[in-house]
Image (spheres, rainbow, N blue to C red):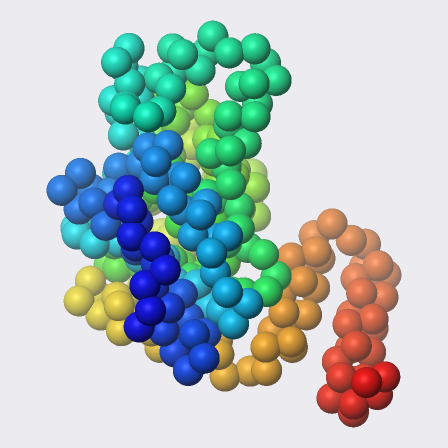
Amino acid sequence: MTELLNRDGVRVALSGDGDTVATVTLDNPAKRNAQTGATWSALAEAGRLLPGSVRVAVLRAEGKSFSAGLDLRVITPEGVPGMPSFHELAQLPEAELDTAIAGYQEAFTWWRRNDLVSVAAVQGHAIGAGFQLALACDLRVVADDVQFAMREPSLGLVPDLAGTSPLVELLGYARALEVCATGRFVRAEEAERTGLANLVVPREELDAATADLAAALLAAPRDAVVETKALLRGAAGRSYDEQRAAERAAQGRRLRDLAGVGE
């Protein structure tokens, strides 16, 4: 295993034949993996550091909780060292505030790029920013003690870390609104029933089940998985005929590649 990064409560290591698997670990269990600007900077750097050999990115966390969400010191006047407090952010001109939030979002956006498949292994609490980080991944394997909650509206805020789109895709508008507006917990049975979780396993089997899924994802040829992921991700934004055309184009590329045509 090759370590790529270890800072600010985030570790990144490569494994697998040819460094095909990247494991990103939230490693601040004493604070239930609460997130700050430094956490987001490290997660964004992780995405930039991954070599092209990586096909599967696994996101996991040490300790009892996946992530308790935002470090609530951020909402105090003192804030967190190295990160503007909410009061300081509120004083920024609109364009600068937009840029600041966009920078935070970078930690949550690279997980869905088409050249890899990302899997979140989630146990215990995944609240607010923790919930959104789990939602950033393509797939979620969860422990039977999982508790998802979107608490930003309860703090007078909105979920702004790229979590609203996947939440609506998975749950539908009405349930997504209800979950966010009430801030209630979504537990394992509901997560699996609604499609929020791909698989629910006992807590002690979480790492093994995630490793099994990663191995299964590596079984198919990489380019076929990349093309399929791109087709599925774009399907909601295309008409039926546009999607059929996209399928034809993708299949044409695969057939030519397999036949060695055009090399």
Residue found 58% across the figure and 56% down from its top: 113
- x and y, in percent, of residue 257 in the image: 76, 84
Which is more toward the observer, 16 or 187? 16
Residue found 13% across the figure and 42% down from its top: 30
Q: Answer with left or right where residue 263 lies relative to residue 174.
A: right
Q: Answer with left or right where residue 48 lies relative to residue 35.
A: right
Location of the N terminus by quadrant is: bottom left
Location of the C terminus by quadrant is: bottom right
Tell me which corner region of the image, top left, top right, bottom left or bottom right, holds residue 208.
bottom left
- x and y, in percent, of residue 127 in the image: 31, 38
Tell me which corner region of the image, top left, top right, bottom left or bottom right, holds residue 35.
top left
Q: Is residue 149 visible?
A: no
Q: Is residue 1 above or below residue 42?
A: below
Residue found 22% across the figure and 70% down from its top: 205
Q: Answer with left or right where residue 16 lies relative to residue 115.
A: left
- x and y, in percent, of residue 50 in the image: 48, 60
- x and y, in percent, of residue 27 in the image: 23, 50
